[in-house]
Image (cartoon, rainbow, N blue to C red):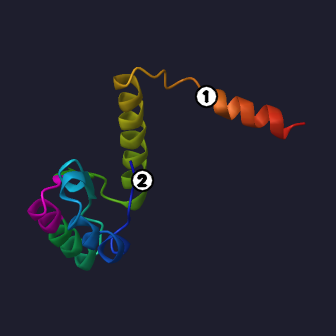
């Protein structure tokens, strides 16, 4: 899983959708959309979604409901926490285990 921010996505990732086709067809894009985005970035997202779909990638959109920046950020934090927890559980991983953080702190304190 990776994330790319519009408009940087348009410069670095779109050309990569050409090849290899097998990878593109296994790729999924989740666009986090908001009415708070500038009209220019809203248009960029629309075009980027169209290109990704045309190239065979799976595309989904999630519309952020927050009407101001604070509520939108809080909503995104909640959603990202939910999705990462659900993904871990789906893969049989206990999301409350943080063994590498404990390891890191233990060795950093030495």
Residue 58, how many percent across, how many down? 16, 50
Mark drawn on residue 73: 2
Mark 1 Cα shell of 10 Å, populated few (<14), some (14-19), many (≥20): few
Question: Which residue corresponds to mark 1?
Answer: 98
* Residue 50 located left or right of residue 37: left
Q: Is mark 2 on a helix, strand or loop?
A: helix
Q: At 40% across and 53% down in the image, what residue appears?
A: 2
Q: Which residue is drawn at 49% across and 26% down?
A: 95
Residue 3 on the magenta span: no
Per the model, the C-alpha gap separating discs 1 and 2 is 25 Å
Q: In this view, does 106 lie above or below 47?
A: above
Q: Where is residue 72 in the image (x, y as percent from the top left)?
A: 36, 54
Res. 15 image quadrant: bottom left
Considering only order in the chain, which callout, 2 or 1, is on the residue closer to the N terminus? 2
Using residue 99 as the reference point, say whether residue 16 is left or right of it: left
Whether 86 is drawn above or below 48: the answer is above
Point out residue 44 in the picture as x, y percentages from the top left corner: 22, 74
The stretch in magenta equals: 49-58
Residue pushed farthest left?
54
Task: Identify the residue at horizontal 43%, vertical 37% (top origin).
Answer: 81
Q: Which of marks 1 and 2 is in front?
A: 1
């Amino acid at each position: 899983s990776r994330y790319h921010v519009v408009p940087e996505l348009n410069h670095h990732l779109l050309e990569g959708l050409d090849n290899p086709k097998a990878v593109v067809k296994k790729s999924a894009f989740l666009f986090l959309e908001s009415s708070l985005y500038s009209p220019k970035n809203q248009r960029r997202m629309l075009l980027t979604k169209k290109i990704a779909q045309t190239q065979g990638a799976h595309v989904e959109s999630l519309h952020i409901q927050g009407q101001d920046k604070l509520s939108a950020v809080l909503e995104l934090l909640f959603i990202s926490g939910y999705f990462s927890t659900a993904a871990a559980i789906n893969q049989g991983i206990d999301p409350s285990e943080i063994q590498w953080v404990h390891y890191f702190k233990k060795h950093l304190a030495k």
